Amino acid sequence: MNSFAPNDPISSFEAVSWFFEEAANYLQLSDGIKDLLRNPWRVIHTQVPVRMNDGKINVFQGYRVQHNGARGPYKGGIRFHPDATRDDVTALSCLMTWKNALADVPFGGAKGGVQCDPSKMDLVELNSLTRRFTQNIEHILGPNRDIPAPDMGTNSQVMAWMMDAYGQINGHTPSIVTGKPIELGGSYGREAAPGKGAVIALSVWAKLVNYELKDRKVAIQGFGQVGKAAAENLIKLGCIIVAISDVNGGIYNSTGLNIDRLNEYFQENQTVVGFESSDAVSNRELIELPCDILVPAAISEVINSRNANSIKANVILEGANYPVTPAADKILNESGVAILPDILVNAGGVIVSYFEWVQNTQQFRWTEEHVNRELERYINDSVKTAYALSGSVQTLRHASYIVAVERVARAVELRGFV
Ligand code: GLU
């Protein structure tokens, strides 16, 4: 591994390319294959005009980036977020290629996004936005071409609208999206999978390195799909959740938060802020709180060269995509913090998406127990594979990238399309 790391600030795509480059150099890939794998195969940038409820037309920018399809149909979520720029969506599409290869699901990698603020739109406006975006990219989608899923700012309802809009043109096609509502062919266990998968990855790793999880203090940034399920599953392992946050701010109690009561409070108030027996902390402060395990499960780049030296945790579980910049990664590695990287840890969502696609294709529903058993098997395999290599290449991130990049490069070579 190179001892140099690019300084912050750095664009998301440059950062993800940096992690890729390190693995590609280790594998001694040719310059041509490196060029092919560094950059996306196809980028669609489309206007998404929506007539808002006040009668005005708003034109949003939409993207679908297909990074690499050597291992199977393109696969990855659709994000509705103000930061869903071309650069961010491209970086996230690369992460999907590596994540899918490492998890060994038969998919390539893609990501989509519409730059908007869904919290300022109602269901009618969001339905129109989703339909228009789907119509605009429909020609590059397909159950054997490209299969979207939920991501930040989207959910099973958005997937239902996408499936319907695609079906209006192509006929009823449940396998065109994953993360659908159960009633429309969604899979049991899909909603909890990203958070649950992260905790399975942590416990597999903990056993490998003899790290006792019981009574560990955990701070979680984010109380969305990943953070919530992660908190519930960490408690089952005997961990103590000392801090948690959402977009409005965070809460801290050094002796532990009652997550059942917090869930009820969140349902009523739509925020964790103001929860009983806790101190208010900002999202920035949460990263630096005294704890053993830090779980960034919200947005990108929250751990960077400004705060990496102040982190107290000795384990970082990357529930979010790209929460740690290359500069911070270097600082933390040097100070002995164990980082369980995003492409290894947050694959639970796409693994169960794969099961959903299989169920849709076979028109046969699995039980929740079956889904969870298979999820554990997949994560167990990928963590053990990455861990086995990490001894000789120093970090779990570097090892994860090497395994993933090698698998994709091999698929490119076997297909013989260059
Ligand atoms: N958006 C999720 C991710 O970043 C899931 C993608 C999928 O299921 O296709 O992994």
Image (tube, helix red, strand yellow):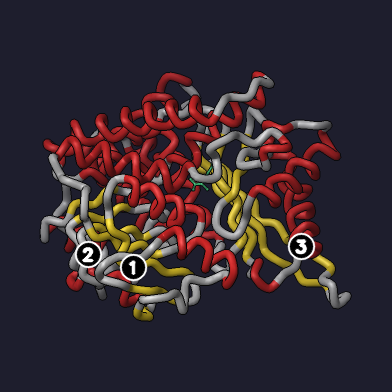
Q: Which residue is mark 1?
A: 243
Please identify, in this view, whether the residue under mark 3 or under mark 2 is nearer the observer: 2
- Mark 1 and mark 2 lie on one chain; the one further toward the N terminus is 1
Helix, strand or loop under label 1: strand
* Three-letter amino acid code at the position of disc 3: Leu
Q: Which mark is residue 123?
A: 3
Q: Nearer the viewer, residue 367 or 62?
A: 367
Q: Residues within 10 Å of mark 3 (few under 14, many from 20)?
A: few
The mark that comes first in sequence, 3 or 2, is 3
Q: Secondary structure at mark 3?
A: helix
Q: Amino acid at mark 1?
A: Ala
Tell me whether circle 1 and circle 2 mark residues in contact (CB < 8 Å).
Answer: yes
How far apart are labels 1 and 3 at the CA level? 32 Å
Q: Nearer the viewer, mark 1 or mark 3?
A: 1
Residue behind mark 2: 291
Which residue is more in the foreground, 403 or 191?
Answer: 191
* Camera sees residue 60: yes
Relative to 291, does residue 274 appear above or below in the rendering? below
Q: Is residue 283 above or below residue 351?
A: below
